[in-house]
């Protein structure tokens, strides 16, 4: 994450904005934070550190990828055990009024908070792939908030609404895991399987064994539904995840190994073909010093 988007830690526990605020913090020293509550919703995305969070006298040790969703007037505080690692997190605040506005658009926007309020389940664990996708949304939003691009205001609104809906979907899908055979078609089953196993071997031979159909039938069904070969689709999915992970600060080697590329040369060729730039040059673009836009 670029340092230009990092905020000094705020002791303020009220919103300046009418609708929402987003902060990225990375602290190497910090006074302990006292128990507090506020009149807006707080979404807390944990990246790194030796930290637990206390919510209504219940202590939750945190690990990478954890999301805390804290409704208004719920007492909480972080407890910092040490600073052997930087204490890194995103914090997203959203007003009750804006949440009510979204709920008027669709009750799907309200599922997560209603579930949390009724069941007092505040902490949600995520695997690395799911959290990287979510982190990419946060980075896009914070970049847009710090830009001066044409269409900034409506783009921010789209990003915020997408983020809130994504969080609701995340909670819903954790509470309603898919049952085997629930999807409607082989194509949908394939897409779900690829999404869940993107870091593994996804050869036609492996997919054929998983779904008990010939690899030629799988290739035909996929091409017919999407217009891409299944290999092209998997490669594009992996490249997008690698790109998002590099933006969020993961090293190039860890990135391509995490998301299923067998060796650097094949990853390099695919990345250069897809994005017109080498992985190393793309990585350097994410860490170059900030220049104010004129």
Image (tube, rainbow, N blue to C red):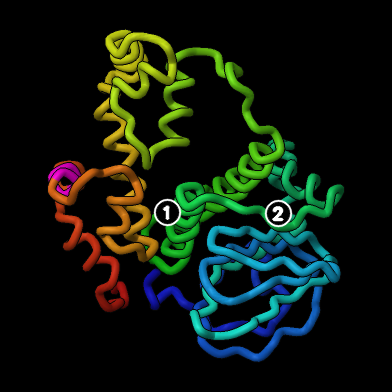
Residue 249 makes an appearance in the image: yes
Label count reads: 2
Q: Which residue is mark 1?
A: 151
Which labelled disc corresponds to residue 273?
Answer: none
Residue 54 in the image: x percent, y percent? Answer: 76, 71
Residue at the image position 17 percent from the left and 62 percent from the top: 281
For this view, does 219 lie left or right of residue 17? Answer: left
Q: Position of residue 282 (x, y in %)?
A: 22, 60
Q: Quote the CA–CA distance across marks 2 and 1.
A: 20 Å
Q: Which numbered disc, 2 or 1, marks the residue that appears first in the sequence?
A: 2
Q: Is residue 61 above or below residue 86?
A: above
Q: In the image, is 33 to the left or to the right of 268? A: right
Magenta stretch bounds: 266-271
- From the image, state whether disc 2 or disc 1 is nearer to you: 2
Find residue 191 and report its image quarter: top left
Q: Quadrant of residue 186?
A: top left
| Quadrant the N terminus occupies | bottom left
SS for dot 1: loop
The image position of residue 208, as x and y in percent, is 36, 16
């Amino acid at each position: 994450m670029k340092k230009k988007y990092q905020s000094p830690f705020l002791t303020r526990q009220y919103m300046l904005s009418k609708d929402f605020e987003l902060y990225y913090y990375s602290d190497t020293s910090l006074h302990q934070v006292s128990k507090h509550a506020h009149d807006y919703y707080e979404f807390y995305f944990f990246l790194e550190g030796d930290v637990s969070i206390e919510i209504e006298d219940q202590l939750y040790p945190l690990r990478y990828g954890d999301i805390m969703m804290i409704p208004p007037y719920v007492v909480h505080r972080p407890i910092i055990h040490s600073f052997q690692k930087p204490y890194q997190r995103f914090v997203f605040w959203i007003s009750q009024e804006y949440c009510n506005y979204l709920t008027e658009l669709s009750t799907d926007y309200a599922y997560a908070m209603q579930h949390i309020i009724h069941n007092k389940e505040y902490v949600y664990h995520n695997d690395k792939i799911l959290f990287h996708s979510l982190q990419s949304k946060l980075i896009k939003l914070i970049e847009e908030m710090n830009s001066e691009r044409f269409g900034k205001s409506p783009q921010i609104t789209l990003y915020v609404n997408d983020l809130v809906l994504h969080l609701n979907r995340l909670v819903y899908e954790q509470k309603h895991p898919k049952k085997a055979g629930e999807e409607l078609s082989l194509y949908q089953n394939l897409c779900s399987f690829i999404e869940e196993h993107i870091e593994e071997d996804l050869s036609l031979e492996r997919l054929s064994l998983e779904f008990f159909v010939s690899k030629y039938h799988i290739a035909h069904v996929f091409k017919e539904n999407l217009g891409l070969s299944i290999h092209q689709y998997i490669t594009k999915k992996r490249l997008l995840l690698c790109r998002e992970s590099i933006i969020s600060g993961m090293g190039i080697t860890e990135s391509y190994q995490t998301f299923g590329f067998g060796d650097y040369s094949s990853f390099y060729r695919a990345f250069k073909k897809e994005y017109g730039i080498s992985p190393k040059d793309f990585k350097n673009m994410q860490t170059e010093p900030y220049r104010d836009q004129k």
